[in-house]
Image: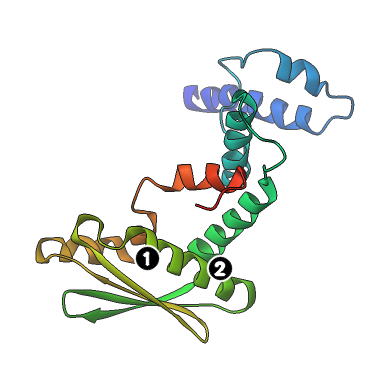
Amino acid sequence: MFRLALLVGLTAPIGAIAQTAEMPGMDHHAMISHPRDAAAPMDEGQSAFSAIQQVVGLLEADPTTDWSKVDIEALRQHLIDMDNVTLHADVKNEPVAGGVRFVVTGTGPVRDSIRRMVTAHATTMNGIGGWMFAASESDDGADLTVLVPPADEAKLRGLGFIGVMTRGMHHQMHHLMIARGQTP
């Protein structure tokens, strides 16, 4: 009984917030002009939206931002590429001496996203930590061959394609550069 009461007590405020979010006449100006309430949700609701919101906040806080060069739509398109590759690409792993060849495929926009993301990541990460990357476009996407030192072979297999794609702390600055209209 206590658990049920606790569950109802914890979920009732969430339901009230969800209902409030859809009510007409909501005063968004009042919500953004006051600091966040500690009890308010911290998640912006969707990861691409959150990434864009963070970048917009950085740009607005920087008095040197050249708004004539800012291109938030380019960042949105890049995040769509990331989503396509992460969630919609098909990946086959082929062992090669000293590493793995990832055959990454898709159709239409997913295929195009694969080509952009795989080739860019290979160029950025090649040689870092002794890991060698080679990418080539295929009819249905791209192939990514990753060769690693013997001590990292198990790590490479454990990471798989998407784990390899996440490596390197360049992503955040890359997103800011895209938004600023710069070539990453």
Using a 10 Å C-alpha cutoff, classify the residue at mark 1 as few (fewer than 14 neighbours), some (14 to 19) or many (20 or more).
Answer: many
Q: Quick check: 7 left or right of 109?
A: left
The label number, if any, that marks residue 113 in the structure image? 2
On screen, residue 88 above or below 52:
below
Q: Which residue is mark 1?
A: 122
Relative depth, front residue between 120 and 106: 120
Q: Answer with the quarter of the image where residue 111 lies.
A: bottom right
| Residue 152: percent from left, percent from top | 16, 61
Q: Is residue 17 above or below residue 71?
A: above
Q: Is residue 162 visible?
A: no
108 sits left or right of 168 in the view: right
User: Residue 52 bears which disc, if any?
Assistant: none
- Give the amino acid at mark 2: Ser
- In the picture, measured across the screen, residue 165 lies left or right of residue 131, that is right
- Helix, strand or loop at label 2? It is helix
Q: Helix, strand, or loop for circle 1?
A: helix
Asked whether residue 154 is in view, the answer is yes
Distance in Å between CA atoms under marks 1 and 2: 14 Å
Image coords of residue 37 (percent x, y): 61, 14
Discs 1/2, front: 1
Residue at horizontal 58%, vertical 56%? 78
N-terminal of the pair, mark 1 or mark 2, is 2
Name which residue lies at 16% across and 74% down: 98
